[in-house]
Image (cartoon, grey):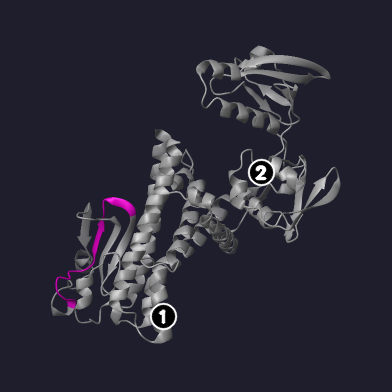
Amino acid sequence: MEVILIKAVQLLLALTILVALHEGGHFFFSKLFGVRVEKFFLFFDPYFHLISTRDNWLRKLLGKEPVSGENSGDNYKGTEYGIGWVPLGGYVKISGMIDESMDTEQMKQPEQPWEFRAKPAWQRLLIMVGGVLVNFILAFFIYAMVLFAWGQEYVPMQNYKGGMAFNERAHDIGFVDGDVLLRTENGTIDTRTTGDTYRLISEAKEITVLREGKEVTIQMPDKLSLLDMINEVPAFMDVLIANQVDSVVPGMPAAAAGLVKGDKITSFNGTPISSYNEYTNELARIQDQTLDCTAEDSLRLRQLVLTVDRAGVADTLNITMDKDFKIGFMPLIPEAEPVRIEYGFFESFPAGFNYGMNVLGGYVSDLKYIFTKEGAKSVGGFGSIGSIFPAAWDWHRFWNMTAFLSIILGFMNILPIPALDGGHVLFLLYEVIVRRKPNEKFMEYAQMVGMGLLLLLMIWANLNDIIRFLF
């Protein structure tokens, strides 16, 4: 329960920052061009809100007259700032435009100079892209400050001297356990994350590996799905870990059976194995078999027969795993020298921009998988978003995740879908090209269709989360 709470608080804080600044972008350009902002709300407030205030108190504090009288319009008493009770986003209500409020009565009134619709197209365009602009600038700034504060540390693929372990599909393509990934036809595989490496592999036409001291080129299939690679069990590739025991936990089944440091596990229930990766694969198969079996069968399946090589002498050990399928030993983890990069304050800005652009490019590239069957199933809601945050509070991870979500929020909002900022931009570009505003009734219907589509997408995403949680 504590882990869920920590993740939920991080998600809520990140979304609060992102939504407030996104809407602040619309607010800034609206005020800059003299467009009235009636409401600025964090979270949605159907029927009621938690707190609210108007900006007349600020005007009084600055020694200015409160907004009132004939020049301010009927019922306008300054911008209302507040916090709603539905933590799904936020909004600014801008006078004279068709938005989430669907205030069509206002649009029937004569056009006023302080309204959105009365402003030139270029000003309206900046007002609409203001939120997205802030999201991208914020992401690049966060990445820059993260690099400045923590630097960057990663292990290049070439530094895993023992190479990688591959699953059956990778073996069919031509990879062999122990291969060290060197480069694709586009250059060196010098990626910072597993996801980036998978993306390069899925898009490569050929990959050069180091195998037993010699370079070997592997021809890649035309269609290799990144989504399949990520979801495969066992993993498409992982760091190759030797089948040698590094330490044994006292009081656990392995210690009781006589397993000692230095032993090499050579077979698992009669199946020969040559790496710790193969050990975990066999273990996963047993766990799958126990999902729908009786307690008696589960106990039987947890009884292992391991053959070990101890200083050249074979020995057989009978071990019963505990209820968590553990026997209590650690393998010998291969050493791999990390690369650490430190950034000065001014160096961090171009580095943060490049890092953010790489993240954006990867995200856009991966969107094509949404339109596949497996991709549709992988779409997640608030539960999936919350799960990417660490179980313990970690500011480094928090700010990285916040920057990532800022990029997603910015990109998704600029898509040309009615009800999103990109939909309004699309209609504005139409106006600039044909020199005529779209029909207001059409805009109303488009807004309703867009809101309906977004609502269905939100329901689908969160339904996927519920299904994954239950099954």
Labels 2 and 1 touching (C-beta < 8 A):
no
Q: Nearer the viewer, residue 157 or 282?
A: 282
Which residue is located at x 41 percent, y 80 percent?
Answer: 430
Q: Does 346 sit left or right of 438 as displayed?
A: right
Within the magenta stretch, is there residue 105?
Answer: no
Residue 31 visible in image: no
Which residue is located at x 49 percent, y 43 percent?
Answer: 394
Name the quadrant containing residue 113. bottom left
- Residue located farthest toward the bottom when viewing the structure as drawn: 435
Which residue is located at x 70 percent, y 25 percent?
Answer: 246
Quote the CA–CA distance across marks 2 and 1. 46 Å
Q: Does 403 sit left or right of 355 as displayed?
A: left
Q: Does 247 sit left or right of 296 as displayed?
A: right
Name the quadrant containing residue 315. top right
Image quadrant where one finds the N terminus? top left
Within the magenta stretch, is there residue 74?
Answer: yes
- Disc 1 marks which amino acid? Tyr
Q: What span is colored magenta in the figure?
A: 72-88
* Picture coordinates of residue 146, whole percent (x, y): 53, 53
Q: Which residue is mark 2?
A: 236
* Picture coordinates of residue 19, whole percent (x, y): 37, 58
Q: Is residue 460 above or below residue 333?
A: below
Q: Which residue is mark 1?
A: 430
Q: Is residue 17 above or below residue 447?
A: above
- Disc 2 marks which amino acid? Phe
